[in-house]
Amino acid sequence: MDEEYYKEAFKVLSLANIGAKKAQEENHRLGLPNVYSIEGRTVFVMPNGEIKTEWP
């Protein structure tokens, strides 16, 4: 039972990671930053790789 649960959870997590990566690529393709929260601070990663801590 536990092994099946972990296999299913891994499958769901893998699909979520694929979706998140596609969304990040789409943001950059549209010229939008990807937004993250790192240690409670909002961080913007611009399409050119620049990292900002204030709203771009």
Image: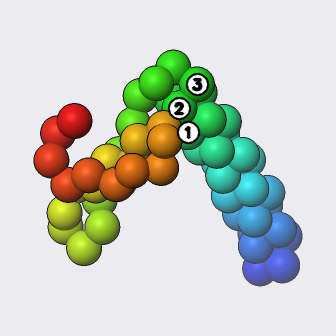
Nearer to us: label 3 or label 1: 3
Residue type pointed to by label 2: His
Q: Which mark is residue 28?
A: 2
Residue 46 in view of the camera: yes
How crowded is the residue under tag 3: few (<14 C-alpha within 10 Å), some, or many (20+)?
few
Which residue is the site of mark 1?
24
Nearer to us: label 1 or label 2: 2
Name the residue at 51% across, 20% down: 30
Q: Mark 3 to mark 1: distance in Å?
A: 9 Å
How many labels sit on residues?
A: 3
Which residue is the site of mark 3?
29
Q: Mark 2 to mark 3: distance in Å?
A: 4 Å
Q: SS of the residue at dot 3?
A: helix
Name the residue at 25% across, 73% down: 39
Q: Mark 1 to mark 2: distance in Å?
A: 6 Å
Occupied quadrant, residue 3 = bottom right
Is 35 above or below relative to 4? Answer: above
How crowded is the residue under tag 2: few (<14 C-alpha within 10 Å), some, or many (20+)?
some
Residue 12 in view of the camera: no
Q: Position of residue 21 (x, y in %)?
A: 64, 44
Name the residue at 48% across, 41% down: 48
Name the residue at 32% across, 48% down: 44
Residue situated furthest bottom in the rendering? 2
Instruction: Specify which label sits upstream in the sequence, 3 or 1.
Output: 1
